[in-house]
Image (tube, helix red, strand yellow):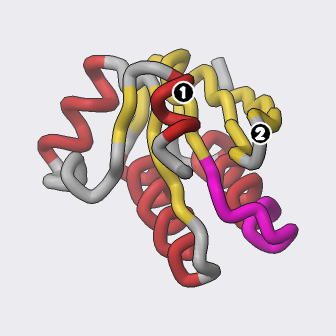
Amino acid sequence: MSVKLNTRQVGDVTVIDVSGRVTLGEGSSAIRDAMRDLTAKGKKKILLNLSEVSYIDSTGIGELVAGFTSAADAGGTVKLLGLTKHVKDVLQISRLYTVFEAHDDEGHAVQSFA
């Protein structure tokens, strides 16, 4: 199953719902392209909902970091929502868990941008 993205607005926060596998190729490039597009449009508050991500590899993690960096360079913020056990484990193994602010509840995540 390839990755699917759905972008929606919750107040001034842009939520990207990600589902499927985020791997080398289509999955990671789709996330990278979506995040670049949002920052180019001036969207500075981005919440990546990863609750439906079944698998992520090192390339996918790299794209999360690249998106985080490009948003920060543009004065924006990227936060994560709904980490599955696999995604959380990969972030912890790569020592990136502390880089990203992660939330379990969408309401709290949206409020955290205020």
Q: Which residues are magenta?
A: 37-46
Find disc 1 in the rendering and name its residue: 21
- How many C-alpha atoms fall within 10 Å of the one at disc 1: few (<14), some, or many (≥20)? many
Give the amino acid type for the residue marked by disc 1 in the picture: Arg
Choose top left, top right, bottom left or bottom right for residue 102: top left
Please state which of the two labelled residues, at mark 2 or mark 1, is closer to the viewer.
2
- Is residue 45 rendered magenta in the image? yes
Quarter of the picture containing the N terminus is top right
Residue displayed at 74% across by 59% down: 33
**Position in image of residue 42 (x %, y %):** 80, 70
Q: Is residue 56 magenta?
A: no
* Upstream in sequence: badge 2 or badge 1: 2
Q: CA distance from mark 2 to mark 1?
A: 28 Å
* Residue where numbered disc 2 is placed: 11
Residue drawn at 43 percent across, 23 percent down: 82
Task: Report whether 57 appears left or right of 37.
Answer: left
| Amino acid carrying mark 2 in the image | Gly
Frontmost residue, 99 versus 90: 99
> SS at mark 2?
loop
Q: How far across and how far down the image is residue 112, in percent?
A: 47, 43
